[in-house]
Image (cartoon, rainbow, N blue to C red):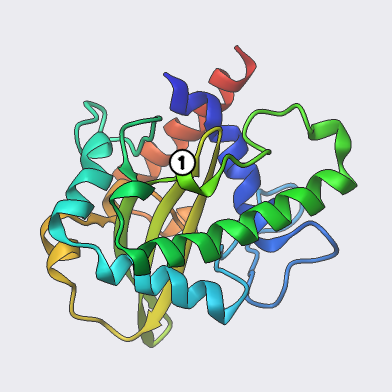
Amino acid sequence: MRERGYLAAVLLLAVSLIWGCQGPPPPAARRTGSGDSPAHFYVGLPSPEEQQAVKALVLSLTPEQVRKANAWTKSSPEGLPRFDQGKGLPYAELTQQQKEAVEVLWARVEQRAHSFLERKPHLREMPGLVPGPVEQAEIFNVGYYLIPEETKEHTLLSFLCASFPTAVPMETTLSGVIELTPGLEAEGLDVSKYCVITREPERLRPEARARFEKAVQEGMAGKTE
């Protein structure tokens, strides 16, 4: 399946393009674990402009738009998040304001990809590291997740933006518990169930974490085939 071939690039892009690869991650990118344990990142967006763009897009999507963005994942027999070319909500079907939000986000993806490949030219041939044009972008896996953190709660908004062969997870958090829009309430993905984007996999429910680990393993296997 094509999306498995892209998964390794998505995992790399989530850290490489969103946070960049120069020096340690900023304070908002928190690691857990030590030694040889894998590090888990809070994969937030680094600028207020980008966070606002994610919020504006997700909260403006109609039930019909969210349904189209999520249909491919919701039809998965294994219950796994997935994406494939031509299966998402296309850029052409967005409103002008929604297009502008996607353009803000994709411009930063292109900037970071260019900078990343300048520093690591040997990775230029790796599938998924050269973004496609924004006009061919598709939206997948629009979702939300209420994250308890110590005594505070906040709401995660997320989606996957793809202009093949590149796909990049986008997310932001809002303070407190928000009232879901009709689109999210009717058609949005509960990220804790679908684990489309997760900030700390160990916080997932056991069944969701098992699906997450299976998706990673299958994605890596597909990349080497």
Is 69 situated above or below 18? above
Residue farthest top in this picture: 225
Q: Which residue is drawn at 54% across and 19% down?
A: 222
Callout 1 amino acid = Gln
Which residue is nearer to you in this view: 32 or 67? 67
Could you say where residue 50 lies in the image, as x and y percent from the top left? 53, 72
Q: Quadrant of residue 146?
A: bottom left
Question: Is 109 left, or right, of 73 in this rendering?
Answer: right
Q: What element carries label 1?
A: helix
Quarter of the figure with the C terminus: top right
Q: Residue at x 34, y 31 (%)?
A: 86
Which residue is nearer to you in this view: 198 or 45? 45
Q: How crowded is the residue under tag 1: few (<14 C-alpha within 10 Å), some, or many (20+)?
A: some
Quarter of the figure with the N terminus: top left
Q: Name the residue under label 1.
A: 136
Is 124 situated above or below 67? above
Could you say where residue 155 lies in the image, as x and y percent from the top left? 34, 75
Which residue is nearer to you in this view: 71 or 174? 71
Could you say where residue 6 lies in the image, as x and y percent from the top left? 54, 30
**Total numbered circles:** 1
Q: Residue at x 39, y 30 (%)?
A: 84
Is 6 situated above or below 61? above
Q: Residue at x 58, y 26 (%)?
A: 220
Question: Is 138 left, or right, of 124 in this rendering?
Answer: left
Question: Is 20 left, or right, of 88 in this rendering?
Answer: right
Let me know if residue 133 appears in the view.
Answer: yes
Which residue is nearer to you in this view: 65 or 196? 65
Could you say where residue 41 lies in the image, as x and y percent from the top left? 60, 61
Let me know if residue 199 appears in the view.
Answer: no
Question: Is 78 left, or right, of 14 in this rendering?
Answer: left
